[in-house]
Amino acid sequence: MTEAVPLLDVADLTVEFSTRRGIVRAVEHVDVRIAKGETVGIVGESGCGKSTLARCIVRLIDPDTGAIVLEGRDWAKMTRENVRRETRHIQMVFQDPFGSLNPRRKAAELVAQGPIVHGTPRAQAIADARELFALVGLDPAAGDRYPHEFSGGQRQRIGLARALALKPDVLVADEPVSALDVSVQAQVLKLLSELRQRLGLSIVFITHDLRVAAQICDLVAVMKDGAVVEHGLAAEVFGNPQHAYTRALLDSIPGGEFAREHDTAGLAGA
């Protein structure tokens, strides 16, 4: 998907599930490459396999075939124990910020939890967590509050701080703004862009909303029935789609042709 040397190279990835009707391929021979500092969007309708792909990249789900190579190491071949040791390199932000936060722990403790597991002294991890609160636009003193005391947008910022606490090379964001209203979506997307530039993050951004992808992604891969049917620069894919499914997705956006001709005009600089 990019001519730059890939930081993360997902090659020929396949994930199968057994059902009462037989074997279902949720992800089928998918290739995704992402260079340092890039944001690659995985887009498509619900059920197309994009969230399964995201969970597979971070090894919450094991692939049946294929490779997940990060800086020369194949995560697909790692044991679970090795994945736990190396998990700091790839972190995930989930769609539901409230469901992914332990309601019994204070926010600063949630952010500090990962570094503590990886050997950072607790006092230092808590201090670092408060600095991360400031980085994601929250009051450091808010670390003493519980998840239910925050708004949805604030909880998503906590989720980002928790992921960033381990200083990952790659951030996998699975529908991170779909549960938020439009104004809060814009704030979180702006924050993600700023963090990418400041920290040199590579981001795999999962979304069903092409308008959201247009705002943040350098490249996109369009998924249908578990397979990537079109991929390339966001401006080119959205501005001149080659696959009928991509065209159908764009035509389903309110505004239809207008959305394709005008909303995508500034993608290259978004």
Image (cartoon, grey):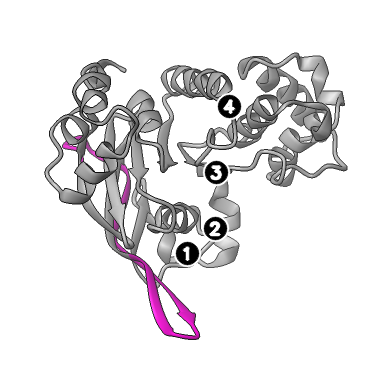
Q: Main secondary structure of the magenta part?
A: strand
Q: Residues within 10 Å of mark 1 (few under 14, many from 20)?
A: some
Determine whether 176 is above or below 58 in the image.
Answer: above
Closer to us: mark 1 or mark 3? Answer: 3
Circle nearer the N terminus (2, 3): 2
Residue designated by label 2: 83
Q: Which residue is mark 4?
A: 181
Q: Which residue is mark 3?
A: 92
Of the residues tagged 3 and 4, which is closer to the observer? 4
* Along the line of sight, the residue nearer the viewer: 212 or 144: 212
Taking 141 as reference, is 1 left or right? Answer: left
Disc 4 to disc 1, how far (Cα)? 39 Å
Q: Residue at x 53, y 23 (%)?
A: 182
Mark 4 or mark 3, which is nearer the start of the sequence? 3
What's the distance in space between the residues labelled 4 and 2, CA to CA?
A: 35 Å
* Position of residue 118 measured from the top left corner of the image (x, y, whole percent): 68, 45
Q: Amino acid at mark 1?
A: Met
Mark sitting earlier along the chain (4/1): 1
Task: State the residue at coordinates (62%, 19%).
Answer: 136
Which is closer to the viewer, label 2 or label 3?
A: 3
Residue designated by label 1: 78
